[in-house]
Amino acid sequence: MHQQPETNNLDQPHANQNLFTETPFVGKKRRTEFMAKGVFFLMTVLMVVPLVLIVFYLFYKAFPILSIDFLFTNPTHGMRAGGIWAALLGTMYLVLISLLVSAPIGVLAAVYLNEYARDNWFTRIINLAVVNLAGVPSIVHALFGVGAFVLFARMGRSILAASLTLAIMTLPVIIAATKEALNAVPMAFREACWNVGASRWQTIRLIVLPNSISGILTGIILQVSRAAGETAPIMFTGAVFFKAISEGDVFAYGLFDQCMALSMHLFTISTQVPGVPEALPYGTAVVLLGSVLLVNMLAIVIRAFLRSRKKW
Amino acid sequence: MVVGMEKPKKKIEISDLRVIYGRKEALKGITLDIFENEIFAIIGPAQSGKTTLLKVLNRTTDFVPGTQVKGTVKIDGENIKEVKNVYELRRKIGMVFPLPVGLPLSIYDNVAFAPRAAGIRNPGELNELVERCLRQAALWDEVKDRLDSLGTRLSGGQQQRLTIARALSHQPEILCLDEFSIAVDPVTTMRIEDVLKELRSQVTIILVTNLVQQARRLGDRTAFILDGELIEIDSNEVIFSNSPGNRMTYDYVMGNFG
């Protein structure tokens, strides 16, 4: 054991003189750090600028038409005047019904896949299918909706058929997001519960779900904007060019009615109808954006509330 | 321990236990008996299968995909593979693992978790149980005024004692401690060791430890496991003497390897 003792700087009386002078290496390190931070900050600004511009531009163009009346009256004069009530209500119906279907199914399926399923070829195929379905273009979901709901299940072109098509579209993403949230709960918690004789379900109910609910809700609510914004899946399954409904009545649509929708309305008045005043499509876009932002805001509030109760 | 005066009752009988994770054989044919109300210490270097042995006992190896358990393990004469009520089996065994796991619940709920999971709802009964377990784990005095604050906010040593309280909360007949003192300061370790000595009259204790001295202090008998094989099992007088049955045991205990 005749190792040369390491020179320990702290023990050397003269070691301190180097402590506050900058060596070339430290200088380089400091400059690199500064540059790295600068680049990251620049990218963040770059990302925010178009976002802010879009919102301002939309509001600027839509300003002349925005009013409470715009929200609560039907389009008139062959879509060239009036409001967007029928489309707004239609979108609400579609989003709400599709989530009522896809959220419970998606969350429960994800719980099974993450908490119960063993890792075998069957579950691997299911997981693969979920991932791939999440990447399928919405127009393909539309064709499936036409075949399965409109024709085969004889729902006809209706709110129900369109909602179910949207539900099929959002389902894989909800499953993926829920699995992610469940996965974030440390395995040690589950093991601790199993060790004291708790069943899997007791563990899920008492520990896993309460600690992943904020992530699950975020995943679900993010799908609201997707369901509200997609045109393709509803175009062939239940949304129509024009339908007048009684203004101000939130129960104006029935399940088997056809409906208007904001996304489709925006599409038709910007491309299919000549002579629409410029403010109309911008106004529609603002309402679509605004309602999505409203829902997202709600999600953020709920999440902040649940996070504050998060316990580790 | 005086052998031969009265025949101690066998609590756990393990014969030719093999555990295979995928391709890796973690335990390669272990045969040993553990008697009622003894402190049975298991020593051996890391990765030698000590923790696996504990996980076999309460069948949490079921949760590890691709695990094969061969051989027989009997607790109170019952083969654990044939146990119908596996939750009851797990309640019979208290488990404490190296890193403390406070559940994200209040201190009270942490301890009341197991009784509640077993269907005990009576508040009076729960209160009494929680207090007794926290006292046994030497934690009561520190937390009695804040039982509804979060268990996860406690310090590491306190959380480990909370874990011990939880392990006691389902009134186990066997208490397994796996390196319980890793995250605990020496003073607390000594307090827990005192607790273990007291508990000995009520439960059978299996103590897996890296601290050879701890095994020597607490154990009645000690098993030395190396690489999934049982090298030696004997009373502490023999294991920690100058002439244990196996040279490797002597080297390990003396710190010459491992």
Image: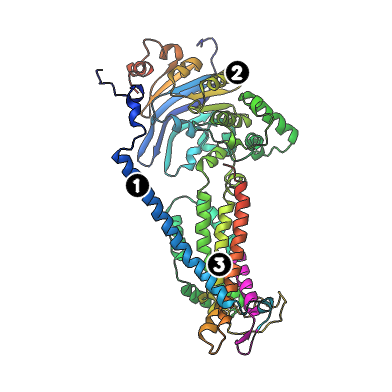
- Residue at 66 percent across and 76 percent down: it is A67
Between label 1 and label 3, give the one nearer the viewer.
1
Which amino acid type is shown beneath numbered disc 1? Arg
**Mark-to-mark CA distance, 3 and 2:** 62 Å
Q: Is residue A230 left or right of residue A242?
A: left
Mark 2 and mark 1, same subunit? no
Please name the residue shown 41% across and 15% down the image. Answer: B239
**In the rendered image, is residue B161 in sight?**
yes
Q: In the structure shown, which secondary structural element does the residue marked by tag 1 occupy?
A: helix
Secondary structure mostly seen in the magenta stretch: helix
Amino acid type shown at disc 3: Ser
Residue A260 located within the stretch drawn in magenta: no
Which tag is nearer the camera, tag 2 or tag 1? Answer: 1
Is A186 on the left or on the right of A31, as rendered?
A: right
Query: The residue tagged with tag 3: helix, strand or loop?
Result: helix
Residue where numbered disc 3 is placed: A225
- Of all chains, the one bearing label 2 is B
Q: Residue A31: which numbered mark, if any? A: 1
> Label 2 sits on what residue type?
Glu
Left or right placement of residue B252 versus residue B125 in this view: left
| Any part of residue A166 in sight | no
Of B234 and B176, nearer the camera is B176
Position of residue B235 relative to residue B167, above or below, is: above
Q: CA distance from mark 2 to mark 1?
A: 62 Å
Mark 2 neighbour density, 10 Å: few (under 14) some (14–19) many (20 or more)? few
Magenta span includes A99: yes
Q: Position of residue B172 (x, y in %)?
A: 60, 29
Above or below, comparing residue A73 to residue B206 in the picture: below
The chain to which mark 3 is attached is A
Residues in magenta, as a range: A75-100
Instruction: Give the labeled residue for mark 2.
Output: B198
Question: Around disc 3, counting alpha carbons within 10 Å, would you say few (fewer than 14), some (14 to 19), or many (20 or more)?
Answer: some
